[in-house]
Image (cartoon, rainbow, N blue to C red):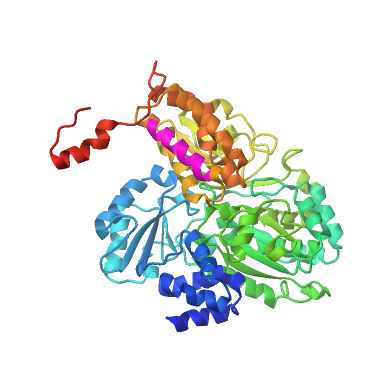
Amino acid sequence: MKASIENILRKYQHDSTRLMDILLDIQDELGYIPEAYVPHIAELLGLSDADVEQTLSFYHFFSTRPTGKYRIYLNNSVVAYMMGRSEVAAAFEEALGIKFGQVTPDGRVGLFETSCIGMNDQEPAAIINNVIFPCLTPFRVREIVRDIKENKPVEEMINYQYGEGQNASEMVRSMVSNNIRKVGPVLDPHYKVGEALKKVISMSPEEVIEEIKKSNIRGRGGAGFPTGLKWEFCRKAHGEKKYIFCNADEGEPGTFKDRVILTELPRLLLEGMIIAGYAVGATEGILYVRYEYRYLKKYLEEILENARKKNYLGKSILGKEGFDFDIRIQFGAGAYVCGEESALIESAEGKRGEPRDRPPFPVEKGYLGMPTVVNNVETFCSVVKIILNGGEWYKSFGTEQSTGTKLLSISGDCRYPGVYEVAWGFSVNDILDMVGASKNQVQAVQVGGPSGSLIEPDEFNRILGYEDLSTGGSLIIFGHHRDLIREVVLNFTNFFIDESCGSCSTCRIVPVLLRNKIEKILNARGVEKDLDEMLEWAKLLKASRCGLGQTAGNPVVTSIKNFRHLYERMIQKNKEYDAGFDLQAAIRDGAEATGRIPIV
């Protein structure tokens, strides 16, 4: 085993900043990362044991204990539950004879929970040994477990056709569907690889940045910072080397548009990164992809290699002297907080994905302390189209403050879940019409994932755009038959608790307090004061270091604002105080065990 680990370390030239890759490779080879080998890894990398342990313990998909030859991770997102996740989970437990978090006595199968895996349009879904199994049913579960007991390779458990497009290609072979429902300029399938790059090398870097600024494109990851300004700041920053990062860690529950781009338009994305490299003077790009999309690894690596052969990557790109740029892929290991740009950089450096204090910002001091641009997948794709057609052309789409188009991941109670490209300025009502969701049957729409807003029908006339409803791209639709507090707000709050990096006391503590209040109300022990206290406590989250902590109270705050009547239905009337503690229930088990009759 030590020999295997040493071979992996040699592959990465004993570079401690590649610790994430090293641990991922060890986990792939052995199924887990033996704790006893931490000192050996640390010694060969010139790190302390604590340095290795902090990274190893931080990420969801790393394990120091055997997880089985077959590792099953079943998604527990809100949409998964809406589409029958509870029945699927029960079927797995019954067929395997174990509970979630356990490994079968023979050590062959591990059953685990995981948060949203980017498959909201085809739930319930699970990852088994990096193979995605979408649209699960109890019957399908029994088939999978039967195949496991027959010791079949996971790849042979695919019992129906592959998904459309590149999902069916030799390098992917996935059952995942793209569900592209509406195509616009970014998703235009007639894109010709390299055309924008050929145009760029006839321009100066400053001219490229000026064209991007002219378009008024803002980052598509959610924060909405002007892309041209970010590139300009990085170009002017001082550093021996500069980097381009693509944030493909779309961990926001309900979002899956980047998955579709990585599958169908990865060359478009890479071309955008190369253009950014030329504009800011960077020599290296890093495509940071969430672990859940590891099934695309071979496919993406082959595309990178083909780009090098065509001289789209490498030295003197397309004959342009001094234009040297290459891209590598960095996979995460399961941490929502790595969607925040500084946490993503920390992770790529082999550390815990904890957000950094700012300033300095990444454009001044980012990856390895050097100026770094971090943009979203969709942003880089849009850049290519701006270079090809011009900034003024791009401004012809959308609104004055929100130019261009937006890719939306739409799921939940609608007829046509999937990816839609629309111009900014569409109303929520327009979206509902488009996806086949009858407005009189829709109770609420979650705009922007758990960190966004839960809006009610009176707000469905609001428009998507930075001037009104900003979103990174996720919309989840809930019908009137859904219990918003129990099924949605509680699920989202648990998600934030699980995904907190724990660095800030606000983010570490307040969401737990909010969950306790929600559970108290659901258990019919809530009072009016509990609602007011939740709103006050949520304000404390604004002191958190990053967006995860700052928005962790949004599910509670926006649901009270727009659906207070649902809470008031459950709280006790004319009662000012209830501790929420049931003494009878607390002593019941002890009394039964000792045969005593409690007197309370």
Report the side of 13 relative to 23 (left or right): right
- Residue 181, given in percent of the width and then of the height, sits at 56, 48
* Left/right of residue 444 with respect to residue 288 in the rendered view: left
**Among the 4 quarters of the image, the one containing residue 66:** bottom left
Relative to 161, does residue 515 appear above or below in the rendering? above
Answer left or right for 515 relative to 103: right
Magenta highlight: main SS: helix
Choose between 357 and 139: the one closer to the eye.
357
Is there any visible trace of residue 463 in the rendered image? yes
At 61% from the left and 39% from the top, the residue drawn is 542
Q: Nearer the viewer, residue 131 or 391?
A: 131
Which segment is the magenta one?
507-520
Q: Residue at x 28, y 55 (%)?
A: 93
- Indicate yes or no whether the magenta region holds residue 519: yes
Residue 92 belongs to the span the image colors magenta:
no
x and y, in percent, of residue 397 in the image? 73, 43
Residue 454 is at least partly visible in this image: no
